[in-house]
Amino acid sequence: MKLEVGDFIIVKKFKASTSPSPRAKDISPATHGDTYSYRIDKYWKVVQVLDDGTIEIETRGGKRHHIDRRHLGFRKANLLDRLFHRNRFF
């Protein structure tokens, strides 16, 4: 997948806690405990595409992260994603 600066991506983050958020997906309880594991979709923007195989992404709050382009947990946002979730990107 070719990514350029300014592209919007959706990143799957896996989390665990005692109370999943309302946007949580694929919720599964722990075998012996009070925690749940779940997935949250994060809506981020590509800030920089680096030569070492990573991309720098920015959250709505301005935080920046680096992820590997070969990471399977993200995809480029399509037109419907940008339309229905426009308030989550920026």
Image (cartoon, grey):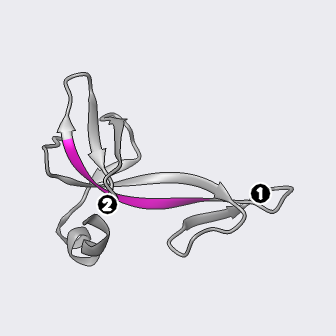
**Disc nearer the start of the sequence (2/1):** 1
Residue 73: which numbered mark, if any? none
Q: Position of residue 24 (x, y in %)?
A: 54, 68
For the point 34% across and 36% down, which residue is it? 66
Circle 1 SS class: loop
- Name the one closer to the observer, 51 or 62: 62
* Residue carrying label 1: 30
Circle 2 SS class: loop
Q: Is residue 25 above or below residue 32?
A: below
Name the kind of residue labelled 1 in the image: Ala
Task: Assess disc 2: are there few (<14), some (14-19) or many (≥20) residues with their C-alpha within 10 Å of its C-alpha.
Answer: some
Q: Position of residue 4 (x, y in %)?
A: 13, 43
For the point 31% across and 53% down, which residue is it? 62
Q: Position of residue 84 (x, y in %)?
A: 27, 77
- Name the one closer to the observer, 89 or 77: 89
For the point 30% across and 35% down, which residue is it? 69
Task: Assess disc 1: are there few (<14), some (14-19) or many (≥20) residues with their C-alpha within 10 Å of its C-alpha.
Answer: few
Give the magenta-colored segment's residue range.
Answer: 38-47
- Which dot, 2 or 1, sits closer to the camera? 2
Q: Is residue 49 above or below residue 44?
A: above
- Name the one closer to the observer, 87 or 30: 87
Residue 60: which numbered mark, if any? 2
